[in-house]
Image (cartoon, rainbow, N blue to C red):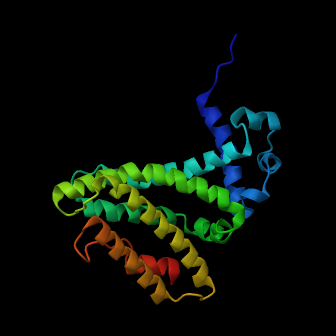
């Protein structure tokens, strides 16, 4: 008789491996931990691990996909709200990503320095690609809505979402670098604010929005992270 799979127990056991890997990435970096470290952290056997994952890389994919899933829960409702104009959706999309990090502030602050190290280069690239795949269709919908409303204009609307995706990711990556630099006073808070102002201007010009109409991070949020 075939063994019956309990999907709840299966998910719980799988999540235990993902939790252990996430902690190891945060504290040691991707290159510095092994499958054995995951087994030590969970008390599981190799057979149990390979029942769920074919390799360490597949386990890391699960870590990254879960992070993206959690962020999607935060920003998803904004994208389907028929009452929101496109400009508001674009702002709230970026703000939602910032909110996701703010709600996990201690965790985020604890991993930022390790996250920027070469040991986590592969994980950063995996996350960047997954986020790009999810962001692009969201932004395509916002761009279409903005052009229909007349709040956005572009001579290349079919390619605008791809450009916005790279711009959002670039802003997020630079924000991490700026946070690290702020810990040693390598940059001032005023320089941080002016950097984000430059991004707002770039967004407005790219989507053809009215100058001053887009502002993703308010003063309290910037000071919360960089003050």
Q: Is residue 225 left or right of residue 124?
A: left
Q: Is residue 225 above or below residue 123?
A: below
Residue at image point 33% right, 58% down:
160
Image location of residue 170, percent across then percent down: 48, 67
Residue at image point 42% right, 59% down:
165
Given residues 83 and 180, the one toward you in this image is 180
Residue at image point 45% right, 78% down:
222
Q: Is residue 157 above or below residue 215?
A: above
Q: Is residue 76 above or below residue 88?
A: above
Residue at image point 28% right, 55% down:
157
Image location of residue 182, percent across then percent down: 57, 83
Q: Quadrant of the N terminus?
A: top right
> Which residue reaches farthest top?
1
- Residue 99 visible in image: no
- Residue 183 visible in image: yes
Q: Is residue 31 left or right of residue 216?
A: right
Q: Is residue 66 above or below residue 197?
A: above
User: Which quadrant of the view contains residue 177?
Assistant: bottom right
Total residue callouts: 0
User: Which quadrant of the view contains residue 54?
Assistant: top right
Image location of residue 194, percent across then percent down: 42, 84
Q: Is residue 148 left or right of residue 168?
A: left
Given residues 72 and 119, the one toward you in this image is 119
Image location of residue 134, percent across then percent down: 45, 49
């Amino acid at each position: 008789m075939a063994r019956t799979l309990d999907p709840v127990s299966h998910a719980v056991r799988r999540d235990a491996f993902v939790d252990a890997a996430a902690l190891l990435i945060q504290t040691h970096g991707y290159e510095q931990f092994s499958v054995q470290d995951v087994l030590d952290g969970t008390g599981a056997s190799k057979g149990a691990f390979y029942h769920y994952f074919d390799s360490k890389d597949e386990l890391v994919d699960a870590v990254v996909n879960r992070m993206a899933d959690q962020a999607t829960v935060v920003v998803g409702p904004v994208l389907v709200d028929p009452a929101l104009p496109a400009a508001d959706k674009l702002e709230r999309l970026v703000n939602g990503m910032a909110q996701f990090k703010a709600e996990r502030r201690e965790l985020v602050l604890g991993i930022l320095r390790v996250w920027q190290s070469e040991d986590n280069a592969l994980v950063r690239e995996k996350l960047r690609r997954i986020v790009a795949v999810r962001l692009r269709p969201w932004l395509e919908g916002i761009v279409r809505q903005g052009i229909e409303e007349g709040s956005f204009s572009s001579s290349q609307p079919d390619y605008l979402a791809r450009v916005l995706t790279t711009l959002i990711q670039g802003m997020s990556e630079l924000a991490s670098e700026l946070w690290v630099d702020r810990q040693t006073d390598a940059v001032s808070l005023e320089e941080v604010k002016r950097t984000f102002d430059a991004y707002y201007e770039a967004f407005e010009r790219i989507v053809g929005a009215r100058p001053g109409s887009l502002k993703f991070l308010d003063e309290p949020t910037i000071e919360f992270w960089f003050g």
